[in-house]
Image (tube, rainbow, N blue to C red):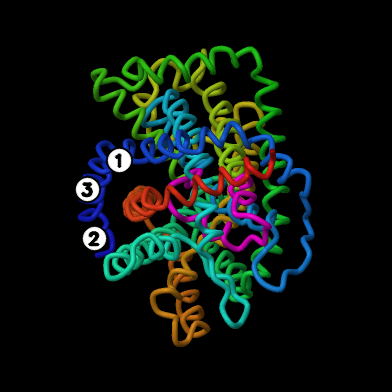
């Protein structure tokens, strides 16, 4: 019965996603990013160095206990934990398989403009956040949506966003992460996916119910360590394949504008596939414009909203231009270059043996050996996806409390967490393709109300950027 429901839902969800990603999402994401790039005079370029100094000048794996909220670095670590997940390994692999190596170029474009978008999201999250009587910080899109639009329309948009994010990240998103962990561990170690699900549920339950402080303490330690391990492994592969790097970069740029040469079909359909794959996987990876990471940045205790805006931009840079790019270079340099199994035939050569879930494992296996490559990616994927589950649970919980927890937030948190844990377990048992498509659909629904509010509050964002300039003179 469950399989029959999956078979019926899958084509419907695919049709919805295809239309939205091809005709709405690309234009909306680029429009928001371009708009804030121009209005802030390309803040992602002007203030990039400032943001790097704020992040790496104050990095700490043991932040001081906060009376409420988090330190700026803890907030960034929580945001990066959400950003650096399966989108970087599995999502990038899917984009390359479907849209060709050129999809990575379009991911870069989306991320560049997305840095301005996330600056706007973080500053607005700081400007509109509130601290309740118990010292809990509440902030995120629902709060700046209701600031932008008063009355019934604002409540409708905020409610629409809250429902979408609870479904997209709190529930469906956790399924994507646990699904990818389960499949990766099954490939690497032969462990049944349901056993992986039980272990995940047990670990997550302890942290889900521990509150913001416990989450911050975990993410500030996991994120830097997991990123360094993955980057080190990726650099070893690239050094071993260094003679293929010029061809690798060449393919990214060539197939960004000539994708039909590697994924087949006519030019129009191929270029649309490359751009839409880059856009939607870029969104799933860095989350700029989606409205998720503002929940983390709202928790930061900083002097000015601009300060956290700077830090937020660095998060997108690390996610896309460092971690995702490294993974993409590993995949292309090992599988798409001369002698690789996907050389010159791309998606046409992909079969049930090579999928978006094990593509990265296959790529690392070229240098590390098949078994160790699978193990290395499985371990990295576990930490990436696990940390993402933790952050997404927080984002969903904030919105669940907005919807249902005004009278009894503790009871709402417990009920929400139990449901989320069920989805984590179920995710290890269901079809990979349906899980990804459902998550994409609800991600897109989040973007719409968030983007409308961002446009409406442009003046506040521009003022924050201008105030920084006045103070620096």
Front in this rendered view, residue 36 or 317 = 36
Q: Please give the residue where the numbered disc 2 appears in the rendered image.
A: 5
Q: Is residue 443 visible?
A: no
Q: Nearer the viewer, mark 3 or mark 1?
A: 1
> Label 3 neighbourhood size at 10 Å, few (<14), some (14-19), many (20+)?
few
Residue 296 is inside the magenta segment: yes
The quadrant in which the C terminus is found is top right
Helix, strand, or loop for circle 3?
Answer: helix
C-alpha distance separating marks 1 and 2: 24 Å
Q: Is residue 190 left or right of residue 21?
A: right
Above or below 216: residue 418: below
Q: Please give the residue where the numbered disc 3 appears in the rendered image.
A: 11
Q: Earlier in the sequence, mark 3 or mark 2?
A: 2
Q: Position of residue 38 (x, y in %)?
A: 45, 33
Q: Nearer the viewer, mark 1 or mark 2?
A: 1
Residue 21, numbered circle: 1
Residues in magenta?
Answer: 285-311
Above or below 351: residue 16: below
């Amino acid at each position: 019965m469950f399989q029959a429901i999956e078979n019926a839902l899958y084509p419907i969800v695919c049709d919805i996603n295809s239309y939205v990603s091809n005709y709405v999402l690309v234009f909306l994401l680029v429009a928001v990013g371009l708009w804030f790039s121009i209005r802030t005079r390309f803040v992602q370029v002007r203030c990039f160095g400032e943001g790097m100094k704020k992040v790496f000048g104050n990095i700490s794996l043991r932040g001081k206990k906060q009376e409420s909220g988090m330190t700026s670095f803890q907030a960034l670590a929580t945001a990066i934990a959400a950003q650096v997940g399966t989108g970087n390994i599995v999502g990038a692999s899917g984009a390359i398989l479907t849209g060709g190596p050129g999809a990575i170029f379009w991911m870069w474009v989306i991320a560049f403009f997305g840095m301005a978008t996330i600056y706007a999201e973080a500053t607005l999250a700081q400007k509109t956040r509130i601290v309740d009587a118990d010292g809990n910080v509440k902030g995120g899109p629902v709060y700046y949506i209701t600031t932008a639009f008063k009355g019934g329309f604002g409540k409708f948009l905020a409610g629409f966003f809250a429902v979408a994010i609870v479904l997209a990240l709190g529930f469906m998103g956790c399924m994507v992460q646990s699904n990818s962990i389960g499949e990766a561990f099954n490939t690497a170690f032969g462990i049944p996916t349901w056993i992986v699900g039980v272990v995940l549920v047990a670990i997550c339950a302890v942290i889900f119910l521990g509150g913001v402080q416990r989450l911050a303490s975990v993410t500030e330690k996991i994120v830097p360590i997991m990123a360094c391990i993955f980057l080190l492994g990726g650099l070893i592969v690239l050094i071993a394949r260094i003679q293929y790097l010029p061809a690798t970069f060449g393919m990214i740029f060539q197939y960004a504008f000539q994708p039909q040469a590697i994924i087949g079909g006519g030019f129009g359909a191929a270029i649309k596939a490359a751009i839409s794959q880059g856009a939607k996987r870029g969104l799933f990876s860095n989350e700029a414009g989606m409205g998720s990471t503002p929940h983390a940045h709202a928790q930061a205790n900083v002097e000015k909203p601009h300060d956290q805006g700077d830090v937020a931009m660095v998060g997108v840079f690390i996610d896309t231009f460092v971690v995702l790019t490294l993974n993409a270079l590993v995949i292309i340099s090992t599988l798409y270059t001369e002698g690789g199994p996907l050389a010159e035939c791309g998606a046409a050569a992909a079969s049930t043996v090579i999928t978006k879930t094990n593509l990265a494992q296959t790529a690392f296996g070229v240098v590390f050996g098949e078994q160790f490559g699978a193990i290395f990616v499985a371990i990295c994927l576990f930490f990436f996806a696990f940390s993402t589950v933790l952050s997404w649970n927080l984002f969903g919980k904030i919105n669940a409390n907005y919807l249902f927890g005004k009278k009894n937030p503790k009871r709402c948190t417990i009920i929400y967490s139990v449901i989320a844990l069920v989805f984590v377990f179920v995710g290890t048992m269901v079809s990979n393709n349906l899980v990804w498509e459902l998550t994409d659909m609800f991600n897109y629904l989040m973007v719409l109300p968030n983007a409308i509010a961002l446009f409406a509050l442009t003046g506040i964002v521009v003022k924050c950027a201008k105030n920084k300039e006045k103070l620096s003179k």
